[in-house]
Image (spheres, grey):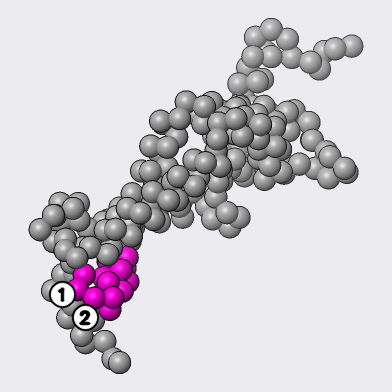
Amino acid sequence: MFSGVPKGENALVDMDSKAGDLFIPDEAHPTGTGGAGVLSRLWLPKGVSASMAKEWFDRRRLSIRPWASFVDQRKFSKPRNFGELCQRMVKNVEVYNSNYTFIFLGLILYCIISSPMLLIALAVYAGAFYVIHLKSLESKLVVLGRELTVPHQMSLAGVISLPVFWLAGAGAAVFWVLGATLFVIGSHAAFRELEASDLDEILMEPV
């Protein structure tokens, strides 16, 4: 009567195989909805693959200006007027955009590591999504007549973990990261002197 239900070691193997689906390509999954597909698409907008994200990250890493020059105190000075301030802000953001990107990512990482409650909230979210996804592999999850896709599963996990994020002060953390990023990047862009080559480019631009 219950011959179709895995027991003992077979049950463990069955669950392991389903958990393993998180790490295999989408096309390898019979329904085409599982897999890492799931992990490779986490936090990525629709139409953006993990390989595209990795390529973007590698381009950013290769275009970073030397950090020694980035923080060279001899290259910092107060702008003489508002026009020079604007020139510095625009050009430095263009020149050091990759450095600024990694500063932003570093501030996010610092905020997460320095907040135990935020780490717990992220763990709750990841656990909720993992459980929901395993359930969807066992049988289709249908809500209001519609099957829950991976984005829907992520949204459901977010709703479940929302109280924990609220207790962890996630909103305050987001504002802190944005404020710290604007302060650090704005200060650097305003007070970092332009290189001679950058000044030449500005002078050669058509009016």
Q: Which residue is mark 1?
A: 197
Compute the Cα span from label 2 to label 1. 6 Å
Q: Which residue is mark 2?
A: 201
Q: Are marks 2 and 1 in contact (CB under 8 Å)?
A: yes
Estimate how packed mark 1 is, as few (under 14), some (14 to 19) or many (20 or more) residues with alpha carbons within 10 Å: few
Identified by mark 2, the residue type is Glu
Main SS class of the magenta portion in the image: helix
Residue 87 is a magenta residue: yes
Q: Which mark is residue 45?
A: none
Residue 192 against residue 139 in the figure, above or below: below
Q: Secondary structure at mark 1?
A: helix
The quarter holding residue 70 reads bottom left
Q: Position of residue 137 (x, y in %)?
A: 71, 31
User: Disc 2 on helix, strand or loop?
Assistant: helix
Q: Is residue 21 magenta?
A: no
Q: Residue at x 38, y 51 (%)?
A: 181
- Where, quadrant-wise, is the N terminus in this rendering? top right
Range of residues picked out in magenta: 79-96
Residue furthest out toward the bottom: 207
Determine crowd level at label 2: few under 14, some 14-19, many 20+ residues with C-alpha closer than 10 A.
few
Residue 37 located left or right of residue 113 = right
